[in-house]
Image (cartoon, rainbow, N blue to C red):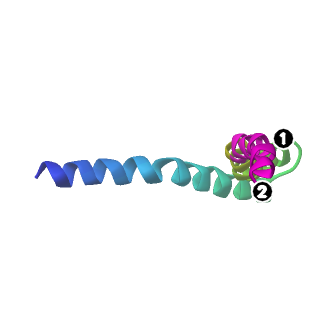
Amino acid sequence: MSQQVLSKTTERSIYRVPAIIALVSGVGLIFALVGDGLWDVMSWLAVGLPLAVAAWVWWPISAFRRKATPASRVLD
């Protein structure tokens, strides 16, 4: 029984952030259809959220690879 509870908790924690990002993105698309001015700015921010999150996650990986590159050249 505890294995099932642990499994459900893990699935919830895995899918929580992607679901929130998808929801905010969808709301941003609706904002783009609703009006102009402030609505457009809110839609740009909401639709740009996945790109910002991807850049935030990718940046440390890229920095790590840049630091690792000279060491790998020495070994070749």
Type of the residue with mark 2: Asp
Q: Is residue 72 magenta?
A: yes
Residue beneath the point at 84% across and 43% down: 41
Type of the residue with mark 1: Leu
Q: Position of residue 57 (x, y in %)?
A: 67, 45
Residue beneath the point at 73% across and 58% down: 29
Decide which of 24, 75 is in the foreground and name it.
75
Between tags 1 and 2, which lies in front?
2
Residue with the mark numbered 2? 76
Q: Quadrant of the C terminus?
A: bottom right
Residue range of the region highlighted in magenta in the rendering: 58-76
Q: Is residue 37 magenta?
A: no
Q: Position of residue 48 (x, y in %)?
A: 77, 50
Judged by its main secondary structure, the magenta piece is helix
Residue with the mark numbered 1? 38
Residue extending furthest toward the left: 1
- SS category of the residue bearing label 2: loop
